[in-house]
Image (spheres, rainbow, N blue to C red):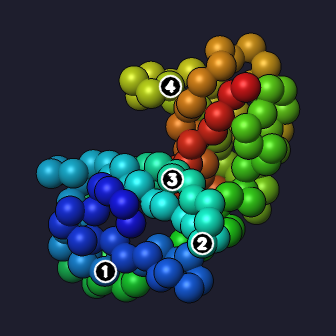
Amino acid sequence: MASGNAAEGISLDNESGELTVSTSSVLDFETTPTFNLGIEVSDGSLSDLAIFTISLTEVEEDEEEEEEEEEEETLSLADASAMIYPNPSNGIVNIKMVALKEATIYNLSSKRIMRSTDNRLDVSALSEGVYTIKLENRSGDRFSTRLIKE
């Protein structure tokens, strides 16, 4: 990781591209509600940097939930990039998520711009730029990534 992981709460497997929680005690909503991880990829001659925003959710903590938090969570970068396509987009964005509950688009100032329960979003009315899209399925799993509007 190039940036955003000073407390080393998140690890990146250089071979598989999987992000894992390495130090769960670092993941505290009250102190750091979001992580902006800069991840650089290279094929040996060309490289690119992507910023991934991981937003934590505040939850009631009791003994049962504390035990769940200790379990390792894995997010594959390949799976993440395939969930929203095409990206960048200038029209319709498709969301590949089973049992999508809600998709919400925020601008870089964290202002909610759009909310939908449909797997197809029309972003043609948005201004060109970078947005954050947050997805939630009916099981309560959440995912957040950037969306580029051309």
Q: CA distance from mark 2 to mark 3?
A: 14 Å
- On screen, residue 5 versus residue 85, left or right, reads left
- On screen, residue 12 versus residue 120, left or right, reads left
Q: Are marks 2 and 3 in contact (CB under 8 Å)?
A: no
Categorize mark 4 by other alpha carbons within 10 Å: few (<14), some (14-19), many (20+): some
Categorize mark 1 by other alpha carbons within 10 Å: few (<14), some (14-19), many (20+): some
Instruction: Identify the mark nearer the N-term, 2 or 3.
Output: 2
- What residue is at 18 percent from the left and 66 percent from the top? 7
Task: Find disc 3 in the rendering and name its residue.
Answer: 49
Instruction: Identify the mark nearer the N-term, 3 or 4.
Output: 3
Q: CA distance from mark 3 to mark 1?
A: 22 Å
Categorize mark 2 by other alpha carbons within 10 Å: few (<14), some (14-19), many (20+): few
Q: Secondary structure at mark 2?
A: loop
Task: Find disc 2 in the rendering and name its residue.
Answer: 44
Task: Find disc 1 in the rendering and name its residue.
Answer: 22
Task: Find disc 4 in the rendering and name its residue.
Answer: 107
Residue 95 % position (x, y): 76, 49
